[in-house]
Amino acid sequence: MSPILRAVAGLGLAAAIAGSTLGAAAFGVEPGRSTDALAVRGAAGWEIWWRRDAAPARWDGDGPLAGRVAWRLGAPGVEWGEFQLRGASEAWRTRVALVRLDPRRVNLSLVTAFTRNESWTVADADSGAVLALDAGQFRRSLPWGWVVSRGSEVLAPEYAPLAGAVVVDATGAVRVVAPDSVAAERERGIAREAFQSYPMLLQDGVVPAPLREPGQGVDLAHRDARLALGILADGRVVVALTRFDALGESLGRVPFGLTTPEMAAVMGALGCRQALLLDGGISGQLMVREANGSARSWPGTRSVPLGLVGRPLTSLPPHLIRQLHEEAIVHPLQPGPVELPVALQRAPVAQERDSTRRGLE
């Protein structure tokens, strides 16, 4: 860790220590004791919506945070927003940055910087990108597990109980594939883009047992900055990045934040049916293009070997746009004609895991 980051982390830790006492009092428990609760900031103040001792094992898609976001328009098919959470300890002030996109209008592709012995950040995304984030988990200078780019397998899958995959198929639909289905998905051979990550946060709305019961391979108490990708029932994609919010936006990269079970709750409360944790900590980063073309960015502290970039399908060649208007295309997750092509060839794009991270955090 650099001296600057170490100093920033020290300031953040001091704020977190103070916040743990203030937060405990605000939650109505004695100082020094974990509250194990999350509250969202609304017009009337802080409202508790989740407690560890009463955490749902299943989310039904109609979560308490779904209507709390003031969504702002980005590029066509993209919305973004933020909200504030209050939790225990260092999570006493946490901001959540969100992007929601329609894959029928946005083409997602990987930036495989590691194949060129390079690394990447969201600042490297060019002006044509409407979304950029780090993808997967990282092992030094390589992504962990399966990587497919433009239909070609770059890295083979690795198999672990909670290691799922994000798959973009030939229709443009985006899916989070369960750990026990990754091998079969690979055999199908229809992935246009794919990457693995861990742990699964939601599977058909259910929080996996290792995220609810200690001693099953996940550190349930560890706090960190978090990044997750989820899928709504209608096929839209939700990306959520947490930021430490006690000392202002400039120090948001301090890697303090939520536990893994709390991040699962956030994704469930946003209405996701499937969700997968990506590499957060000092790797977590996100960029979204606003409606006026400017970039809203939450940068990370380090570069990564693999990124995920979204581009508007309207940027495809005119003859492909004309093809759309001549032939109705049906999206597999939401029946009915769509406005833009999804079963088309992707245009080429120019595009280290933290050793202190423990287990499948």
Image (cartoon, rainbow, N blue to C red):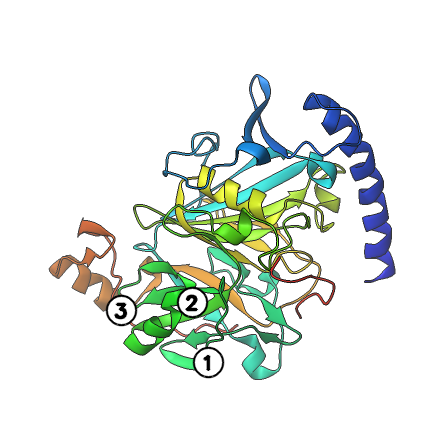
Mark closest to the chain's N terminus, 1 or 2? 2
Q: Which amino acid type corresponds to the residue marked 2 in the rendered image?
A: Ser
Q: Which amino acid type corresponds to the residue marked 1 in the rendered image?
A: Ala
Q: Position of residue 18 (x, y in %)?
A: 82, 33
Q: Position of residue 104 (x, y in %)?
A: 30, 55
Can the viewer see residue 252 in this picture?
yes
Q: Looking at the rendering, which quadrant does residue 45 occupy?
A: top right
Q: Which residue is mark 2?
A: 109
Which residue is drawn at the image coordinates 35% and 75% (left, top)? Answer: 186
* Side of 30 where 78 appears, left or right: left
The number of discs equals: 3
Mark closest to the chain's N terminus, 2 or 3? 2
Quadrant of the rendering where the C terminus is positioned:
bottom right
Q: How many other residues sit within 10 Å of disc 1, few (<14), some (14-19) or many (≥20)?
A: some
Cα distance in 3D space between marks 1 and 2: 18 Å
Which residue is drawn at the image coordinates 77% and 26% (left, top)? Answer: 22
- The secondary structure type at the circle numbered 3 is loop
Mark closest to the chain's N terminus, 1 or 3? 1
Q: Which residue is mark 1?
A: 156
Q: Are marks 1 and 3 in contact (CB under 8 Å)?
A: no
- Residue 337 position (above or below residue 56): below
Q: How many other residues sit within 10 Å of disc 2, few (<14), some (14-19) or many (≥20)?
A: many
Residue 344's disc is: 3
Q: Which amino acid type corresponds to the residue marked 3 in the rendered image?
A: Leu
Q: Position of residue 345 (x, y in %)?
A: 30, 72
- Circle 1 or circle 3, nearest the eye: 1
